[in-house]
Amino acid sequence: PAGRVEFWLRELRTPQLIVEAAGRRRDAATRLSGERALLRAALAGDLDAVERELAGEVERERTADREYWAPLRRELAELRRQRGVS
């Protein structure tokens, strides 16, 4: 089903699998390449570029995660200080 193909093209994190999936479903990969830039490299069969793009995706997710949790961590630390718990 198309929905499943699109899910995997959005979510795969293994460069070889990304290239393989994009090659098998070129139409869907082309359609999603504006949403996930590494699919353009996958369609070209450029494994090195896919790996670089994937590393960038991972780093952006980690940064977003740190930014999301930072205020919550500060709030938790403040609550612990107020209660005298370390």
Image (spheres, rainbow, N blue to C red):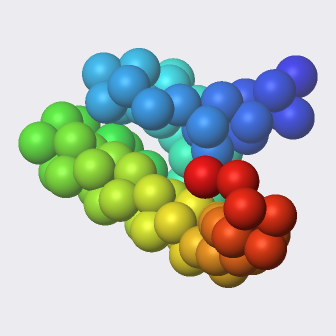
Left of 51 or right of it: where is 63? right
Percent x, y of residue 82:
79, 73
Along the horizontal axis of the image, is 17 left or right of 32? left
Above or below for 55 versus 25? below
Q: Residue furthest left?
A: 48
- The spot of residue 57 in percent (x, y) is 41, 57
Q: Position of residue 70 (x, y in %)?
A: 59, 73
Q: Is residue 61 left or right of residue 52?
A: right
Residue 27: percent from left, percent from top: 61, 45
Q: Nearer the viewer, residue 47 or 53?
A: 53
Residue 50 position (above or below residue 22): below
User: Residue 47 falls in which quadrant of the image?
Assistant: top left
Residue at 81% from the left image edge and 27% from the top image edge = 4
Residue 68 seen in render: no
Q: Which quadrant of the structure image shows residue 75?
A: bottom right
Q: Is residue 77 visible?
A: yes
**Quadrant assignment for the N terminus:** top right
Residue drawn at the location 50% of the way across and 59% of the way down: 61
Residue furthest front in the image: 84
How many numbered circles does the render carry? 0
Q: Nearer the viewer, residue 10 or 83?
A: 83
Which residue is at 61% across, 37% downward? 11
User: In this image, 11 relative to 55: left or right?
Assistant: right
Q: Nearer the viewer, residue 59 or 37?
A: 59
